[in-house]
Image (cartoon, rainbow, N blue to C red):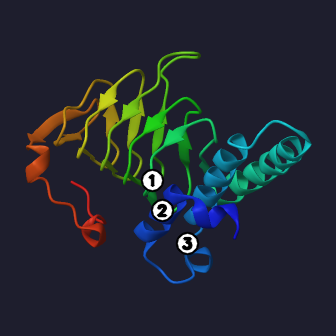
Amino acid sequence: MSSTSHDADWAADLQRYGLSRPFLKEQSIWAVWTYRFGRRIDKRPDGIVRRLLTSIYWLWFRLVETVVGISLPKSAVIGPGLRIWHFGGIFVHPAVQIGANCTLRQGVTIGNRVADGAVPVIGDDVDFGAYAQVLGGVRIGNGCRIGAMSVVLCDVPDGATAVGVPAKIIRLQEVSDVQYEMDSRKEVV
């Protein structure tokens, strides 16, 4: 069996896509697979095989990044169940932490505000609308929704919906009351 079959995070990603043969139907999964491949390489013991695989990873990463317009560097920490709806213009800073079962759409940027500045920490079950930006050392809580084209520059508490430029919280719910259906995550406030 390949190491891919033992990667629970990758299995959770595939489950979120919920398609048969997703590699033929969604280009975004190419970037997710490349990210998980890079993470598996980093878990290997030092040696010539790891160095060779790392070289292959970087070539493949740049190719996929250029073709699909999604930058998910292997140094970012991304939980299982990542789902990217649509592809293109997605940038995740190499030091970002993203929780489990998060959803990104086209144009999302998660990064720092200044060179070498702090980066966001994203909780579990966070849903990002198209072209949303989360910048700086902010924390996005569990179960949050970030509206399309919002620019988040401050913390967002668990269960909140944030929209606007700069983003403001328009709704706050208890995370336990927020019910997400995997298939209904296509619409964002």
Q: Nearer the viewer, mark 2 or mark 3?
A: 2
Residue at left offset 84%, top offset 51%: 56
Kindly tell me whether residue 152 is visible in this rendering: yes
The residue beneath circle 1 is: 80
Crowd rating for badge 3 (residues with CA inside 10 Å; few <14, some 14–19, many 20+): some
Mark 3, secondary structure of its residue: loop
The residue beneath circle 2 is: 13
| Residue 139: x %, y % from top left | 32, 28
| Residue 76: x %, y % from top left | 56, 37
- Asked where in the image residue 123 lies, by quadrant, the reply is top left
Q: Is residue 38 or residue 149 the one in the foreground?
A: 38
As displayed, is residue 188 above or below residue 45?
below
Q: Are marks 2 and 1 in contact (CB under 8 Å)?
A: yes
Q: Is residue 143 or residue 108 the one in the foreground?
A: 143
Tag shown at residue 170: none
| Residue 106: x %, y % from top left | 47, 55
Crowd rating for badge 1 (residues with CA inside 10 Å; few <14, some 14–19, many 20+): many
Residue placed furthest toward the bottom: 20
Q: Amino acid at mark 3?
A: Glu
Which image quarter is the N terminus in? bottom right
Crowd rating for badge 2 (residues with CA inside 10 Å; few <14, some 14–19, many 20+): many
The residue beneath circle 3 is: 26
Kindly tell me whether residue 85 is visible in this rendering: no
Q: Are marks 1 and 3 in contact (CB under 8 Å)?
A: no
For marks 2 and 3, the one nearer the N-term is 2
Q: CA distance from mark 1 to mark 3?
A: 18 Å
For marks 1 and 3, the one nearer the N-term is 3
Q: CA distance from mark 2 to mark 1?
A: 6 Å
As displayed, is residue 95 above or below residue 180?
above
Q: Is residue 153 left or right of residue 71?
A: left
